[in-house]
Amino acid sequence: METVSTNRAHGGVQGVYRHASSATGTGMIFSVYVPPHAQGVRLPVLWYLSGLTCTHANVTDKGEYRRACAEHGVILVAPDTSPRGEGVPDVPEYDFGQGAGFYVDATEAPWAAHFRMRSYIEQELPALIAEQFPMADMGRQGITGHSMGGHGALTIALRNPGRFRSVSAFAPIVAPSQVPWGEKALGGYLGADRAAWRTHDAVALIEDGARLSDLLVDQGDADAFLAEQLKPELLEAACAAAGIPLTLRMQAGYDHSYYCISTFMADHVAWHAARLKG
């Protein structure tokens, strides 16, 4: 692991790191904020998965999470959203290819060789964090994310029962099998068989029996993507049918941007911290 940069922030250290990923076959960059802590103390880990077009830098620069993480003693890890670099396939559209990995392991050419973000997030990067950050308590993990990253957070948590004590999301794509963003991505990466999509669709996973202990979602009611791409009412109905306690907060006047995320980020860090204690 190579250190790209470190900066002091709220008594802790904001770092950006690079490593060679065996999952994607590329270099990958991620950021980690480690709050101030006494030597020998181990801290819970909160994963933040970003949305379409983003890198690790969007939330690192605009997420405004460090004060809350320092207050509650929570490490925040922010990975990239896809493989990048020479030889990695791409398309001109923003919602597919580089910057749009959708947290799946692609099975279709030419994407299958590098687009293995499920394996990267679920297996490789957690192992690297455990190895390189000894203060990280991997027995206490939470996960959150925005938009495509909200989709990632929900599906990863639903597929890995017991790994995450807390789950939240900002404006998540809750049912990618039923919206244009998801149909394009899942069809392109996984092929035409919609049955293979279900393990990458939060609503479908819940319908098929996956469960969470509880869930917090913030969604702006002025979000331009609300009706066509996000459809939180589908998650609300699935959670109600499955008995999953869902706190869905429709935030008046807020859009899909980091102005919304940064406003409610401290609430999410506190939500996770309460569930990650001890």
Image: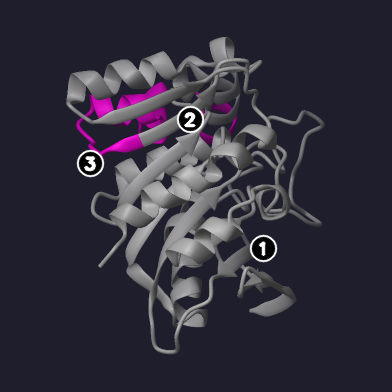
Looking at the rendering, in which quadrant would you find the C terminus? bottom left
Secondary structure category for the residue under label 1? strand
Label 3 secondary element: loop
- Name the residue that disc number 3 marks: 213
Label 2 Cα crowd, 10 Å radius (few <14 / some 14-19 / many 20+) = many
Amino acid type for the residue under numbered disc 1: Met
- Stretch of the chain drawn in magenta: 187-215
Q: Decide if residue 38 is on the left or right side of residue 214.
A: right
Q: CA distance from mark 3 to mark 2?
A: 17 Å
Query: Does the magenta segment cover residue 268?
Result: no
- Residue 158: x and y in percent read 31, 41
**Callout 3: few (<14), some (14-19), or many (20+) C-alpha neighbours within 10 Å?**
some
Question: Which of the labelled discs sits on residue 192, or is there none?
Answer: none
Indicate the quadrant where residue 91 lies: top right
Mark carried by residue 218? 2
Give the residue displayed 38% in from the left and 35% down from the top: 216
| Residue under the point 44% across and 62% down | 72
Residue that carries the numbered disc 1 in the rendered image: 28
Q: Nearer the viewer, residue 180 or 60?
A: 60
| Callout 2: SS | strand
